[in-house]
Image (tube, rainbow, N blue to C red):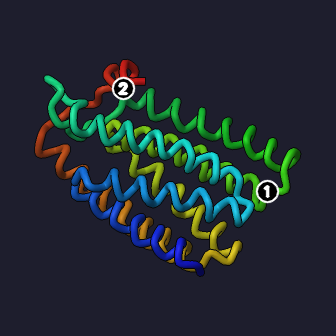
Amino acid sequence: MTPIEIIAVVAGFLCVYFTIKENILCWPTGLLQVSLYIFIFYDAKLYSDVILHVIYVAMNIYGWYYWLHGGKMRKEARIKEISRAWLTGSVIGSVLATVLLGWLMATRTDASFPYPDAFTTIFSLVAQWLMSLKRLESWYFWIAVDVVAIGVYYAKGLYLTTGLYSLFLLMAVIGLLKWRRSLLSTQDVPDGAELEAAA
């Protein structure tokens, strides 16, 4: 447990807390968290996670902008759903990408736990993209990521991070329920076409 990990954990908790609340502060706290974890995961030889968090930096900047200006008439974006076809395609594509990345990490690097690490990397990218677009389904992906990540980080001795992801798992379930209530209150409908345009 290092000072940088402690700061990253606190920033990560605040990021998810603000995300559940649909508070724009989730993005600057998220930027701090992902930036610090680049160094933490490099030291732990979790190279897929290093790549993931470098990409996260850009996605956090985009999400920050989209939440502020991505809605109708460039106003604040609201929670929406994606179509079943988009959800199915996202899951299948994520599984295939996980297998490919896991194989590359297993055969070309000294990565620890290449396939579980690849899973958290790929599914986190999809989750973060959907979160940036304020889509409800992002929480399903985060729940899957948290379950796998808890085991990986515990095995690597990142105990504080393991505790953080255990908390993330609980918060992801809470976030899913809260966002669903918010979605129902605005009576939004699935909007795969808009997601396709945004992609």
Q: In the structure shown, which secondary structural element does the residue marked by tag 2 occupy? A: helix
The percent coordinates of residue 60 (x first, y second) are 41, 44
Q: What secondary structure is marked by label 1?
A: loop
Q: Amino acid at mark 2?
A: Leu
Is mark 1 in CB contact (under 8 Å) with mark 2? Answer: no
Identify residue type, mark 1: Ala
Of the pair 150 and 16, the residue shown nearer to us: 16
What's the CA distance linking mark 1 and mark 2?
A: 34 Å
Crowding at label 2, few (<14), some or many (≥20) Cα neighbours within 10 Å? some
The residue at the point 14 percent across, 23 percent down is 73
Give residue 83's quadrant in the image. Answer: top left
Q: Is residue 138 left or right of residue 45?
A: left
Image quadrant in which the C terminus is located? top left
Residue at (68% x, 55% y) in the render: 117
Task: For the N terminus, give its image quadrant.
Answer: bottom right
Of 195 and 42, the residue lying toward us: 42
Label of residue 111 in the image: 1
The residue that disc 2 covers is 195
Foreground of the two, 68 or 113: 68
